[in-house]
Image (cartoon, grey):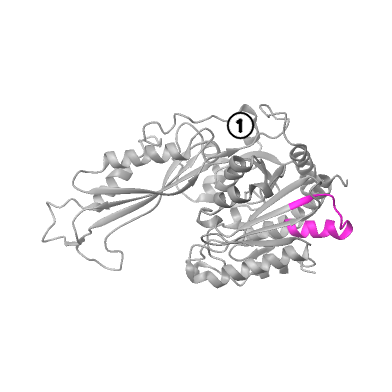
Amino acid sequence: MSFDDPIAALATYASHPSVSADPSYAEGMVAAREHVTRLLGDLGFAVEVIETPMHPILLATRGDPTWPHLIIYGHYDVQPADPFDLWTTPPFEPVVRGGRLYGRGVADNKGPQIVHMTALARVLAKNPELPLRITYLIEGEEEVGSPSFKGFLEQYKDRLDAEMVLVSDTGSPNPEQIVITTGLRGLVALEARFKGPRMDLHSGVHGGPVFNPLRAVSEVCASLHDDQGNVNVPGFYDDVSEPADWERKELLKMPQTEEDYLDFIGSPAFKSSPRYNALESVRFGPTLEFNGIGGGYQGKGSKTVIPSESFVKITCRLVPNQSEEKIAALVKAAISDRCPEEVTVDVEVTGGGDPYVVIPPGKPGSRGDEPELLKRAFDATERAIEESFGVSPIYMREGGSIPIIGDLKQVAGLDSLLVGLFTPADNLHAPDESFHLGIMEKATTAFEAIFKKLSGSS
C-alpha cells in the first residue's frame, strides 16, 4: 500500500517539480496532481479534478453525509528551487540525510499531507467504516497567492457544509515543541514602477538634469519607515487589535529567546517597531517589507546609464482588524504622494488577503457556541500532542499568511485548526528545504488519535 513506507511516499511526491509560478514546470504540476490523486484514491476517496483559470483543485470526499464533516486543506504546488547551486543535493531528488528528508516541498506542504494521509490510512485499516466524513481540498496555486481559490469556494460552497477545517501548513519552533496556530497575518502585495525618460540614457551626456528613477524609488522606499522602525504610512496602525493577555503568556512558553532568534537569523541586531519586541513583532505586529528592488544595469562591471525606469515589490503583513483593501489603498496613496514630480509612478496591487484569528474554545474571549466537532478537535489535538511529543502544545499566532484560511471563514463560515509541522530549520522557500523525520513519525501517531477522537471511535 502507498502508506506502508510514508518516507518513500513523500519522496515520490516531492520528486515531481510542481512549481506553480513557472510555466516551464507544467509537466511537474500535472505529475504531482496525478500522484496525490492516486494517494487519495488508495484511501477510498472519490476525487474530482476541478479546473480553474490556472491550476486545478482536487476535491475529494469519503463518508456518509450524516457523519460529522471535516475538511482537510493542502497544496501540491511548491516554491521555485532557484538558486540550484546552493542545494547540497538536487532539489527534486529527495534524499534522507541526518534524520531529515531533503527536497523542495517536503515541508511546505507535501510532508504534512503525507502525515495526515498515513495517519488516516492506519485508522481506516482498523476501521474501514470510520464514522467521519472527510473532504480534501488540495490546490495548486498556494505559492502564487491562491488566485482561483475564492472563486472555487463561491461555486462549491454547498459541498463544503462542514464543521471545521484541518490544516498543517504552519510552523513550530523545534521538533520537540508543537504549536497550534491561532492566527495568521493578512497580506497585501504591491509593485510600484517609477518611470523617467523614454529610454535609458548615457549618464555622462545626460547626467545632471534628469531625475534618476533609481533615486526616486530609493527616496520613496526610505520614507515608508521612520527612524524607530514604525511604518510611516498615515492610518496604517489605526485598526490594529492588540493581542490578549493569554496570548502574551503563551508566547512566554516559547523555547526561543530573542538572542536565540537573532543568532538563527544571523543579523547584527533587530530593528522592529518599538510597539513590540522581536518575538512579538513577527506574530502580533503589522509590517511593510521590500521584497525586491531594481532598475538599470545588473550585470558584471560598469555600464554608465541612467535607467528609464525602476521598480520595487512590497508586501505588508496585517493583523486582526486590519483590512487588505484599506491598507492597500493607504500604501498606494503614500507612494503616489511621495513620488518626485520629475518621474511618474504606477502602483499595482498584485495579491492579498485579510488576517485570520480563532480563539480556542475555552480560552478568554472564545465564542462559546463553536461547532461540536471544532471543540472536540482542539481538545483531541492537545491531548494527542501531549501523548506523542511529551509536552503540551503552545497556542500561538504565526507571522505568515495563508489567505485561503480567511476565505474559508468568509465564504463558508468555517474556522480552522492549524497544527504546525515544520520548523525554522526546515528552510522553507530556501535551498536545502527539509522535513524532520522525527516530527513526521510523532505527528502521524498524534493524528491517528485525532482522527479516532473526531469520529467518536475512542
* Picture quarter with the C terminus: top right
Q: Is residue 145 visible?
A: yes
Image position of 314 with respect to 111: above or below: above
Residue range of the region highlighted in magenta in the rendering: 116-134
Q: Position of residue 353 (x, y in %)?
A: 51, 44
Of residues 160 and 105, the one drawn nearer to the viewer in this rendering: 160
Q: Read off the residue under disc 1.
A: 248
Q: Nearer the viewer, residue 355 or 423?
A: 355
Q: Quadrant of residue 90?
A: bottom right
Question: Is residue 119 highlighted in magenta?
Answer: yes
Q: Is residue 379 magenta?
A: no
SS state under label 1: helix
Q: Residue at x 70, y 58 (%)?
A: 60
Question: Residue drawn 66% across and 27% down?
Answer: 365
Image-quadrant location for residue 269 = top left
Q: Residue 270, percent across and down? A: 46, 42
Residue under the point 76% across and 46% down: 69
